[in-house]
Amino acid sequence: MAEIKDPENTILMELKDGTVVIELLPDVAPKHVERMKTLVRAGAYDNVAFHRVIDGFMAQTGDVQHANMEKDYNPGRAGTGGSEHPDVPAEFSKLPHDRGTLGAARSANPDSANSQFFINFKDNHFLNGQYTVYGRVIDGMEHVDAIAKGEPPANPDRMISVKVAADA
């Protein structure tokens, strides 16, 4: 496993094939980092489906409103919800959307990010300056690559558990 330099700003995401270690970037996007840690610590991401996974592009998850529990999972609604918290304003930076970076998913409104995020499968520089980058996978990208593909996938993979490394 990768060396964890800042446990307070490192996320441990358990997937079916193993742990994905994500380094958060509070100096780049402090509001997005804070929101993610708030939701992680509330257990909101546990068992949430990857509802939009496009091969060669990205894997999207984090609809804590609609994709939390088996009984709630509705492929038609997954991806339309957020959390009980207000939306987070855009925190665009010069950081590129490279393979393994975490981006804030949102609607057409740049200030509509809430709980959903995506992990880039490859360099997606056409997203630069349009979506907030607030983390990067530092270990376990092979587990992200193995997430079931589809919009939505027939049998979506889920984040089994998500923790802040400082709490693990």
Image (tube, helix red, strand yellow):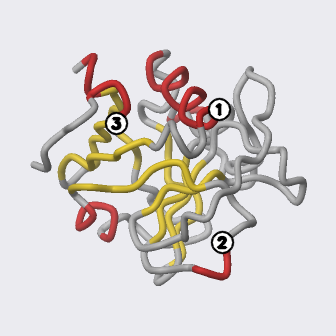
Q: Callout 2: 10 Å neighbours few (<14), some, many (20+)?
A: some
Residue corresponding to mark 2? 128
Alpha carbons under labels 1 and 2: distance apart:
18 Å
Residue corresponding to mark 3? 11
- The amino acid type found where label 1 is placed reads Lys
State whether residue 121 is above or below residue 108.
below
Q: Toward the viewer: 54 or 90? A: 90
Which quarter of the figure has residue 164?
top left
State whether residue 29 is above or below residue 65.
below
Judged from the image, the secondary structure of the residue bearing numbered disc 3 is strand
- The amino acid type found where label 2 is placed reads Asn
Which quarter of the figure has residue 133?
bottom right
- The amino acid type found where label 3 is placed reads Ile
Alpha carbons under labels 2 and 3: distance apart:
23 Å
Which quarter of the figure has residue 131?
bottom right
Residue at screen point 70% across, 28% down: 83
Spot occupied by residue 126 in the image (x, y as percentages of width and height): 67, 82
Spot occupied by residue 14 in the image (x, y as percentages of width and height): 27, 41
Proximity of marks 1 and 2: CB atoms separated by less than 8 Å = no
Proximity of marks 2 and 3: CB atoms separated by less than 8 Å = no
| Viewer-side label of 2, 3 | 2
Classify the position of the C terminus by image quarter.
top left
Judged from the image, the secondary structure of the residue bearing numbered disc 1 is helix
Residue corresponding to mark 1? 31
